[in-house]
């Protein structure tokens, strides 16, 4: 359904000014009400320890989220807010790049306005945890307005693998309820800390990525096609963000120092443990089974 957030925000601000009100007075009260029995232990879909600003303006019980103070939220990583299975990835005229995740027992989450195509980091049917990046904060879709933010929903439907906005329920993070008409919370800390995010886990689906740091961090070189020349230093590699994909499961890497290595998705050298680390890549070629 249409949600005109930008116009609503302007209206709320104008009314507040006219009445001499402080917008901080609209802050919602986070209630420690117990979530319904069986509801997953949802966490904010962002990195552990980061601070976020939430509001329900015009779309309670769904919420919109920006970085605290909104210094610029565009491109910030979005993670699954609980373990589950990706149940839908699609582009919608209103919600833009959208992902739904099934968390079992009828519980779902929905993530709107993602910056990248919804299949950039995950695919339908993929298993995810709180450590799995699924996208980035963006402003895609006609309902996003002009400001980058994550529109987020928790939903319940006893049957089916696809939900809609009619299935929305009040949002809980870390056991605390965030709901109420035109409410906002100026600083909420993510406790999405249960999973250890692999340093190299941000490699987009359909790519093989090479990292300069010995622990899988640092400058990244990524490719989804044959590249006859490359100056990327190789220390670690990772395939497809953990997602098997036909045609992208083997890559032959040639080194400027001489020699080559075949990377195979699912084998240790294809997932962050490349024994020939420290050399410079000369070429990358996609191919069939490694010899």
Image (cartoon, rainbow, N blue to C red):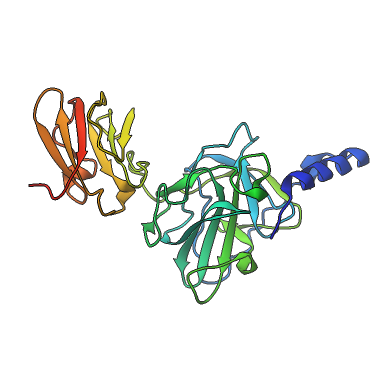
Residue 130 drawn at (x, y percent): 43, 52
| Percent coordinates x, y for residue 231 in the rendering | 25, 23
Left or right, 190 with respect to 251, comes to right
The answer, for residue 217, to whether it is visible in the render is no
Left or right of 22: which side holds 286?
left
Q: Which residue does the image show at 64% across and 68% down from the upper left?
A: 166
> Most extreme residue toward the bottom, as rendered?
159
Find residue 232 and report its horizontal and vertical position in percent.
Answer: 26, 26
Q: Residue furthest right?
A: 19
Q: Quadrant of residue 87?
A: bottom left
Q: Quadrant of the N terminus?
A: bottom right
Tell me: 58 left or right of 15.
left
Which residue occupies the foreground of this view, 280 or 58? 280
Q: Can residue 248 be seen here?
A: yes
Q: What residue appears at the point 37 percent right and 41 percent down from the top-left corner?
A: 202
- x then y, percent, for residue 265: 21, 49
Task: Report how many numbered discs are placed on residues in the image.
Answer: 0
* For residue 290, side relative to residue 69 (left or right): left
The residue at 23%/44% (across/down) is: 271
Residue 99 in the image: above or below residue 68? below
């Amino acid at each position: 359904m249409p949600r005109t957030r930008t116009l609503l925000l302007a209206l709320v601000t104008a009314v507040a000014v006219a009445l001499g009100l402080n917008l901080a007075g609209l802050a919602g009260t986070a209630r420690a009400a117990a979530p319904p029995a069986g509801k997953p232990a949802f966490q904010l879909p962002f990195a552990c320890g980061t601070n976020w600003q939430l509001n329900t303006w015009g779309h309670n019980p769904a919420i919109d989220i920006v970085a605290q103070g909104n210094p610029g939220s565009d491109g910030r990583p979005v993670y699954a807010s609980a373990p589950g299975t990706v149940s839908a990835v699609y582009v919608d005229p209103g919600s833009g790049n959208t992902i739904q995740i099934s968390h079992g027992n009828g519980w779902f989450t929905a993530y709107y306005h993602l910056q990248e195509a919804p299949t950039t980091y995950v695919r339908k049917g993929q298993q995810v945890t709180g450590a799995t990046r699924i996208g980035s904060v963006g402003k895609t879709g006609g309902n996003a307005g002009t400001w980058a933010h994550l529109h987020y929903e928790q939903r319940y439907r006893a049957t089916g693998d696809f939900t809609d906005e009619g299935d929305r329920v009040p949002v809980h993070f870390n056991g605390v309820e965030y709901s109420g008409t035109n409410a906002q919370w100026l600083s909420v800390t993510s406790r999405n800390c249960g999973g250890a995010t692999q340093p190299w886990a941000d490699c987009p689906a359909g790519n093989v990525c090479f990292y300069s740091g010995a622990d899988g961090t640092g400058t990244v070189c990524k490719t989804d096609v044959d590249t006859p020349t490359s100056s990327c230093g190789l220390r670690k590699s990772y395939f497809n963000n953990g997602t098997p994909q036909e045609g992208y499961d083997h890559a032959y890497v040639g080194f400027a120092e001489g020699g080559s290595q075949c990377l195979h998705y699912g084998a240790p050298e294809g997932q962050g443990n490349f024994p020939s680390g420290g050399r410079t890549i000369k070429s990358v070629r996609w191919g069939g089974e490694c010899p």
